[in-house]
Image (tube, helix red, strand yellow):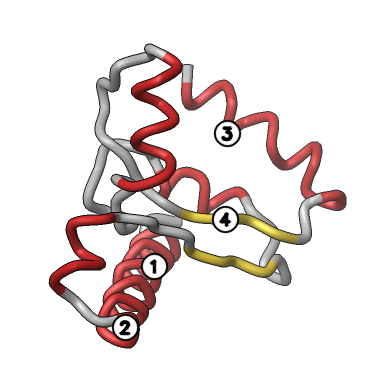
Amino acid sequence: MREQVWSTLPLWSPRINYVQFCDGQVPFDPNPAELIRIARGERLFPGMGGIDLVGLARTIPADATISVEVPHQGWARRIDAQGRAAMAREATLAILRKAAEDQ
C-alpha cells in the first residue's frame, strides 16, 4: 500500500512546497484518544519508528522545505531544547542521506 501512495506523489510534486517529518510506532492503536495522546506527546524522531520516511523523502521535490515536529514529553523532561533540536536535525539528515543513496 505505501508503495502505491508514494508512487502517486510525483503527480503532486509541483504543489508540494512543505513537508513535516516525525516518526511513529507501527502498528499503532487507531483509537482516537490514543492517536491524540501520541500526536501530542509521543512522536518519534525520524528513523526511530516504522513510518517509511525514506520512501517519502525520495518523492518530495528537492526545493521543498522540510520541518521536524517531534513532541515527546519524556524526552522534554530529560533533554533540553537545544539537544532535542540537534537530535532531530541529525535524524532527519540520516533519512535524507539514505533516500539519496538508494536512488
Alpha carbon separation for disc pair 1 and 4? 10 Å
Residues at badges 3 and 2 in contact (C-beta under 8 Å)? no
* Image location (x, y in percent) of residue 26: 26, 27
How packed mark 2 is, by other alpha carbons closer than 10 Å (few <14, some 14-19, many 20 or more), is few
The amino acid type found where label 3 is placed reads Trp
Alpha carbon separation for disc pair 3 and 2? 28 Å
Which label sits in the foreground, 1 or 3?
1
> Looking at the image, which is closer to me, 48 or 76?
76
For this orientation, the residue located farthest to the bottom is: 82
Alpha carbon separation for disc pair 1 and 3? 18 Å
Judging by the rendered image, the residue that carries numbered circle 3 is 6
Alpha carbon separation for disc pair 4 and 2? 16 Å
Which label sits in the foreground, 1 or 4?
4
Q: Which of marks 3 and 4 is nearer the N terminus?
A: 3
Judging by the rendered image, the residue that carries numbered circle 2 is 86
Q: Which of marks 4 and 2 is nearer the N terminus?
A: 4
Does dot 1 land on a helix, a strand or a loop? helix
Which label sits in the foreground, 3 or 4?
4
